[in-house]
Image (cartoon, helix red, strand yellow):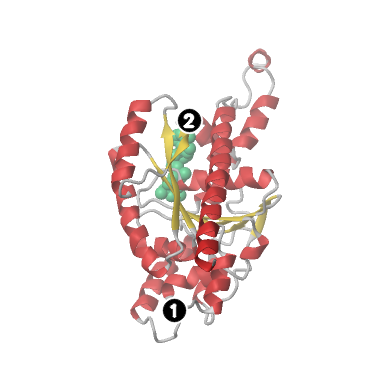
Amino acid sequence: MGKHAGEIDRQAALARVIAITNDKGGVGKTSIVANLGGQLAAAGYRVLLVDLNRQANLADDLGIRRTEVDDQGEGLLSSIVLEGRQPLAVAVEVRPDLDLVCGGTRLEALTPLMVSKTMGAGASGESPFLALADVLSPIAEHYDVILIDCPPENYVLTDLALGAARWVIMPTKTDIGGLVGMTLVAERFTKARTINPNLGLLGAVLFATGTKATAIHTEARSAIEAAFGGHSPLFTTVVRHAERTAQDARRLGKLAHELEVEAAQQPAWWESLRKGGGARRLSSTAASVAADYRNLAFEVLNVLRSMEEAALAVTVGSVG
Ligand SMILES: Nc1ncnc2c1ncn2[C@@H]1O[C@H](COP(=O)(O)OP(=O)(O)OP(=O)(O)O)[C@@H](O)[C@H]1O
Ligand SMILES: [Mg+2]
């Protein structure tokens, strides 16, 4: 059966929406959204970040927590739950070419509301699963890439993201807990494809791991292959373990590449020491972490392009 025109428009608009998801907490979803988005924007891409988390760590990482632009998720909540679903006109500019739809405590109301809408589905003719897709698609043309930061352990909001996304990136740690979370996402992903058949897996990223821990990486690759039925979608780039840089980043509201610049500009250590210490010094590891995110950005764009070309070839083939 042919596709409804509205559905084709929505799919075209949402072609560069990527959900960053893993059911497990603390595996790097927010750090990757902030830094991948920040580096793409710094390179001139127009990027939108959507925060679906009530704890809103993206606001910390981008340095806008408790500023006047931080609406705690109010705008996102009302766009989705209002009758007729309003276009998501609440994005705020947090860096040049980088916009954010804030998450926060106001999103607490969203999960129960979506559950009750799911139970009453059909009454209004609107699919609850496509609520975020509906509010995002009218504004999506303003952006080259849209990244959705998913919450941990919340199927309802993860499903909203999977209903709006064209692609999924799954960060994981190499420990067994992270890999179990990945199996749950693989199952959720398969279910989501029954409603959003366009959804594709862009890749998995190993987060906060040793850059030389190759045996562990090989084990993780096998576990990911098992979760996704023999296909290995693991990105080559890993985000290295760097606790001090991570703490500096979240405390100061700076992205790794911004810390990299500031770390390079700070006075030499002996000058600080001569003056009796002073402010805490930034770790020079920020440069290596920024390079990891830069490599990840290159890899994501390359995989995205080759997947898009492959999808186009299939479409052209089926028409011809
Ligand atoms: N390169 C790194 N090395 C070690 N720790 C890191 C690194 N980058 C970030 N972290 C820390 O890891 C923790 C988890 O990161 P992050 O918040 O990005 O994960 P998450 O998957 O979004 O978590 P949640 O599921 O709670 O939303 C944070 O405390 C963060 O400061
Ligand atoms: Mg997070």
Question: How far from the left and from the top, in percent, is residue 128?
Answer: 42, 74
Quadrant position of residue 316? bottom right
Residue identifier under label 2: 242
Which element carries disc 1, helix, strand or loop?
A: loop
What amino acid type is highlighted by mark number 1? Met
Find out whether the residues at labels 2 and 1 contact each other: C-beta distance under 8 Å: no
Give the distance between the C-alpha atoms of the residues marked 2 and 1, in whole angstroms: 51 Å
Relative depth, front residue between 209 and 137: 137
Please rate how many residues cluster around mark 2, counting C-alpha atoms within 10 Å: few if below 14, some from 14 to 19, many from 20. Answer: some
Residue identifier under label 1: 1
User: Is residue 249 at all visible to an observer of this figure?
Assistant: yes
Question: How far from the left and from the top, in percent, is residue 199?
Answer: 45, 60
Which element carries disc 2, helix, strand or loop?
A: loop
Please rate how many residues cluster around mark 1, counting C-alpha atoms within 10 Å: few if below 14, some from 14 to 19, many from 20. Answer: few
From what the image shows, is residue 108 above or below residue 150? below
Task: State which quarter of the image contains the C terminus.
Answer: bottom right
Mark 2 vs ligand 1: CB below 8 Å: yes
